[in-house]
Image (cartoon, grey):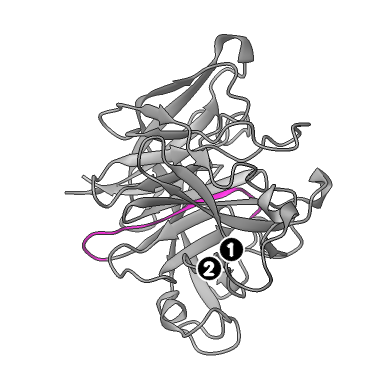
Amino acid sequence: MALYGYTIGEDRDGNASNGKQLDVYRFLIPSGPGGSITPTKVGTVNLPATATTADLEGLGTNPRTGRVGAVNEARATGSTTPIDPTVTVVNNVDQPLAPATTSPTRTPSDLRRFGFESGADFNSSALYNISGNPNPANGVPVGSSLYKITTATPGTLSLVDTFGPATTAAQRQGTQPTNPGKFADGLAIDNLNPGNTRALASDFRTNDGDGNQLYKVDLLTGQLSAPITLRTPSGQALNVNADSGLAFTNSGSQGLFALLETGAVYQITGYQDELAASGLGLGSAGGINGAGFATATLLGNVNLPNASTGVVDYEGFTIVNE
């Protein structure tokens, strides 16, 4: 058995007239720093030209089936569409590729996802999706919201927001975040040590006005913690600016890894004490690396087609033990 990462690219040719061809890649997770990583193409997810938000940025591994599912981003950057027209969930995009597409029913019917970026992961029988906007230039506040998608067919999509004041119409309809000021676009759920706060979200962007960090996520309330700052192994603040995917290894020795849209793979350590801390107000006490810190070590770069040039982004990430 070995650990493999999966990611999905954007529309291969950028030509909307012939539909959307999203290539799926698989690569071995390195055991330590070692330079370049060679991926293998698993297959292609074909979506129709009408799929305006086709980028499958949220990837997760179902702990019950061992198969990989994906959910699309909420809204395309630069889009004039004020809400996401379709929530697309594509199942079984791992090896062997056997995708099946469903469109979950919004509950309530006027629910729309907030933001432009998406991360996702499974917890037992549900797929959770964190969706957010990192850029004030997009015209909506920086922030994130958490959503739950049931895995029945077609399933239901609901907003997870039971902390603080009651959900507003703007939050429900996707124009305001439930976690203002806390952008995250990667989500990893710990299925080895289940609990409502055994989940983390990632933010490797600096153009949202802060640094690179993690957030603890409460899956029952939808609340994000105070930030856990990411540091390099030498103790300096990590300073990259890219969209990210986040994944736990949920078998054997547990690890936490991130994949950036450029193909860079990081291993994250020092978060364990933060996860064990009571409540969500992290950033003020304890932890292996100090108060609210974790360490991100660059393991290498996956040689994904056009990733280094920015022509095709690879933002979703999950891990399967095969």
Taking the image as shown, residue 316 lies to the left or right of residue 30, namely right
The question of residue 132 being in magenta is answered with no
Type of residue at label 1? Asp
**Residue shown at 70%/55% (left/top)?**
171
Pick the residue in front: 266 or 110.
110
Mark 2 residue crowding within 10 angstroms, few (<14) / some (14–19) / many (20+): some
Outermost residue, bottom direction? 285
**Residue shown at 40%/76% (left/top)?**
272
Which numbered dot is residue 135?
none
| Residue identified by numbered label 2 | 221
Outermost residue, top direction? 18
Pick the residue in front: 130 or 239.
130
Give the SS element for disc 2. loop
Taking the image as shown, residue 168 lies to the left or right of residue 105, namely right
Taking the image as shown, residue 55 lies to the left or right of residue 132, namely left
The span shown in magenta is 240-253
Outermost residue, left direction? 1
